[in-house]
Image (spheres, rainbow, N blue to C red):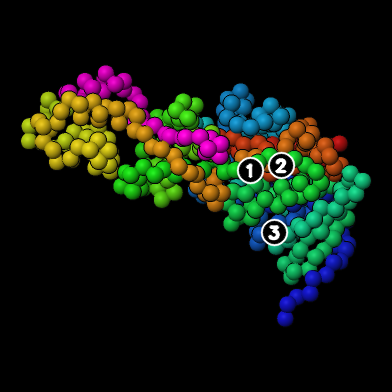
Amino acid sequence: MEETMEIGLSHPYYDVVVIGGGAAGLMAAGTAARTGKKVLLLEKMEKPARKVRITGKGRCNLTNARSVEEFAENVRTNGEWLKVAMSEFTNRATMRFFERMGVKLVTERGERVFPESGKAADIANALEFYCRDYEVDIQCHSRVTEILVSDGKVYGVKYMNKRGFIRKIEVANVIIATGGVSYPATGSTGDGYTFADRVGHTVESVRPSLTPLVSNHPQIEYIKNVWLKNINARLFVAGEMVREEFGEMSFSDRGLEGAVILRLSRDAVDALLDEKSVKIELDLKPALTEDILRERIKREVAEMRPEDFFAELVRRLVPKPLVVPICKELDVHSRLYISKVSDKEFERLIKVLKGWSFPISDYAPFEYAVVTAGGVSCSEVNEYTMESLKVKGMYFAGEVLDVDANTGGYNLQIAFSTGHLAGLLKK
């Protein structure tokens, strides 16, 4: 028999309800409780911090140790607005916080900070322990259906519990930390945007950010699962180069991905939405100019026998999985004798090595995006408190806001900084 839905008033008194048990929500809830507030955290999934547990391929790049100036350069949207939250709870404060919670940290290339154990669960558990240490009431399987507002003030929330009953709680403060819409299987399904829109907030257009890019290049099928290191990638929009990144990338069933591509994807997605042509050019030999590469090829050819194949030359220049695809790209048979290769074909090889072009036809959906771009307009949120400028007692934290950054630990730091500031419940 189907359970009857009913509304009942929940009796315990709370100072604040936090909606969402992700990085921002747990930080906000623990901070509010630490300052003496009675806190209820409502999480619709079966346990908190599901997205934290899978971030960084299960390792959790929790922040970045770069200087304040360098950190700010990696925030793509509303970086100036974010400065107050970042100064209240810096990347160094985040590192001290987790170390005090017993999580040993390591700093790796690019100043990326990880738990020494390599386990994202250590970060998720530390956040949950923080809340429980200060007696936050965490209720899972609890989906908020409505934030109650009257005369421009919050006065309560309605939520559906595990058994399907609707409950109402009277409360004067609500922190919305529902995340964006990336990785929806973890519970990020855009609920916060709906809550914000209902009370008159502007929600900037949401789209995937830090997401794989799809190419219809004919060689893609031959290079799936290939990882490339120390390459330079250039993003072209409508024929003009708009961004350049150096580092690692890979090819997969989802398209082009890896750190370099994710950093370029923000601009690529916006350009595709504007129906502009987009392409990625890969410089596989960024340390060499065309002239130096030309001399390198001449030396390699001089050491080869006339009956050696063209593929052997290419193999001396690139990883083995790229040999056949590059030969196909050049329309030169891999088993052509090196003595038969023309000067024009050598020149084409140089051009491909220094600028292998991949047209971008689409981007991977939210299921594969690391973060969401867009969200609640920051111009309508008090940067000193995270409180709504439209509704008293309504606060925002984390990915629900229109703030996003490059890959490298920056987005989780935004969640921690805005969550901490929201949890202070400043008026």
Give amino acid for label 2: Val
Q: Which residues are magenta?
A: 270-299
Asked if residue 276 lies in the magenta stretch, the reply is yes
Please name the residue that numbered disc 2 is placed on. Answer: 203
Image x and y of residue 10, in percent: 86, 62
Eyeballing the image, is 43 above or below 263? below
Residue at x-position 76% and y-position 46%? 197
Q: Is residue 254 left or right of residue 125?
A: left
Residue at x-position 73% and y-position 77%? 2
- Which class describes the residues within 10 Å of circle 1: few (<14), some (14-19), or many (20+)? some
Which of the labelled discs sits on residue 158, or is there none?
none
State which quarter of the image contains the N terminus.
bottom right
Please name the residue that numbered disc 3 is placed on. Answer: 44
Image x and y of residue 77, in percent: 64, 32
Image x and y of residue 275, in percent: 53, 38
Q: Judge by depth and name the residue closer to the eye, 74 or 340.
A: 340
Please name the residue that numbered disc 1 is placed on. Answer: 206
Q: From this viewpoint, is residue 134 visible?
A: no
Task: Looking at the image, tell me whether mark 3 or mark 1 is earlier in sequence order.
Answer: 3
- Which class describes the residues within 10 Å of circle 3: few (<14), some (14-19), or many (20+)? many
